[in-house]
Image (spheres, rainbow, N blue to C red):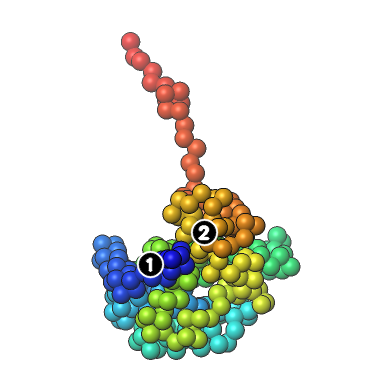
């Protein structure tokens, strides 16, 4: 019997790679820019995105910015730099700690609010990426995967504020398989997802869920399987299914452009007739 887990893991990674690299190359060409910049953390998503972007455009048109903070493990930085060197792309390591510390001068700043500070760090990183992109006529290539996008597990106008999302249709577990298909080291492909926005910060720790379970539920939801049937189809408990789908609903605003107040034109615009 074929299960959802079998289906989600059985995609054609060779074809997916070709579709993604063609997408990147086409988008960059149509935008008439010189290339792309990728923020690389050393994690599986950003490293896979960097590898795909370098293959799509050629290493000379790609820059990797490694933007660690005091919460970033040294191994993550070393993994990011090693991959950039292996791919032959230009790379810079720039600590964001001084930029973050500048916000301590604001009277509204609260050092003890780890979540607000963490989101600020994500937005600082994106500001740096866009500064570099604007200066060099590049596009910012985002590194979010489908699991993160559906859950809303990203910072609005931080890692969510990008020009394109090449791996945005791959679930986290599929990104790991893509990383292995591309020949990335297992130390990267199997590394636990960890935004590192505070000490000991991991994605699964914050979510309280394993991505293997999350992806099955999201895939079932995407297929249109009724909510009440998802626990039976996936083997994931009803409580966890409800938690996952609640996050999808509550974070819908992150996946949409800002709402605009639509005025009633017939009532707002009065044309005076001249006699």
Dot 1: element: loop
**What percent of the width, then of the height, locates residue 148?**
51, 64
Vertical position of residue 61 compared to residue 82: above or below: above
Residue placed most toward the observer, 59 or 269: 59
In the displayed structure, 161 sits above or below 259; it is: below
Query: Is residue 186 left or right of 28 when viewed as pictured?
Result: right
The residue at which mark 2 appears reads as 233
- Residue 125 in the figure: left or right of residue 208: left
Residue drawn at 42 percent across, 76 percent down: 177
Q: Position of residue 269 (x, y in %)?
A: 42, 25
Total labels: the figure holds: 2
Q: Residue at x 51, y 59 (%)?
A: 233
Residue 166 disc label: 1
Q: Quick one: SS at disc 2?
A: helix
User: Who is closer to the viewer here, 245 or 105?
Assistant: 245
Residue 64, percent from left and from top: 42, 79
* Quarter of the picture holding the N terminus: bottom left
Query: Residue, x 34% and y 14% (percent of image)?
Result: 274
Question: Which residue extends farthest top?
Answer: 275
> Residue pushed farthest front?
1
Quadrant holding the C terminus? top left
> Which x, y percent locates residue 235?
56, 63
Q: Is residue 243 left or right of residue 151?
A: right
| The image quarter in which residue 71 lies | bottom right
Residue 231 vs 19, above or below: the answer is above
């Amino acid at each position: 019997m074929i299960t959802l887990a079998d289906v989600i893991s059985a995609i054609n990674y060779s074809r997916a790679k070709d579709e993604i690299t063609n997408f990147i190359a086409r988008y960059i060409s149509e935008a008439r820019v010189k290339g792309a910049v990728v923020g690389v953390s050393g994690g599986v998503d950003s490293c896979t995105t960097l590898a795909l972007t370098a293959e799509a455009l050629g290493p000379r048109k790609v820059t990797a910015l490694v933007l660690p903070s005091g919460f970033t493990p040294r191994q993550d930085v070393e993994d990011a730099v090693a991959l950039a060197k292996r791919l032959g792309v230009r790379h810079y390591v720039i600590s964001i700690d001084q930029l973050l510390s500048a916000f301590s001068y604001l009277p509204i700043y609260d050092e003890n609010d780890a979540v607000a500070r963490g989101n600020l760090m994500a937005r600082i990183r994106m500001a740096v990426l866009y500064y570099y992109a604007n200066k060099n006529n590049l596009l910012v290539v985002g590194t979010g995967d489908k699991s993160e996008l559906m859950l809303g597990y990203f910072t609005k106008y931080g890692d969510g504020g990008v020009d394109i999302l090449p791996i945005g249709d791959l679930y986290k577990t599929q990104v790991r398989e893509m990383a292995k298909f591309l020949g990335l080291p297992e130390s990267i492909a199997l590394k636990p997802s960890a935004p590192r926005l505070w000490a000991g910060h991991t994605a699964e720790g914050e979510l309280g869920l394993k991505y293997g379970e999350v992806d099955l539920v999201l895939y079932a939801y995407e297929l249109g399987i009724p909510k009440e049937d998802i626990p039976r189809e996936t083997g994931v408990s009803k409580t966890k299914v409800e938690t996952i789908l609640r996050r999808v609903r509550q974070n819908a605003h992150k996946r949409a452009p800002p709402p605009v107040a639509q005025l009633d034109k017939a009532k707002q615009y009065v044309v005076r007739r001249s006699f």
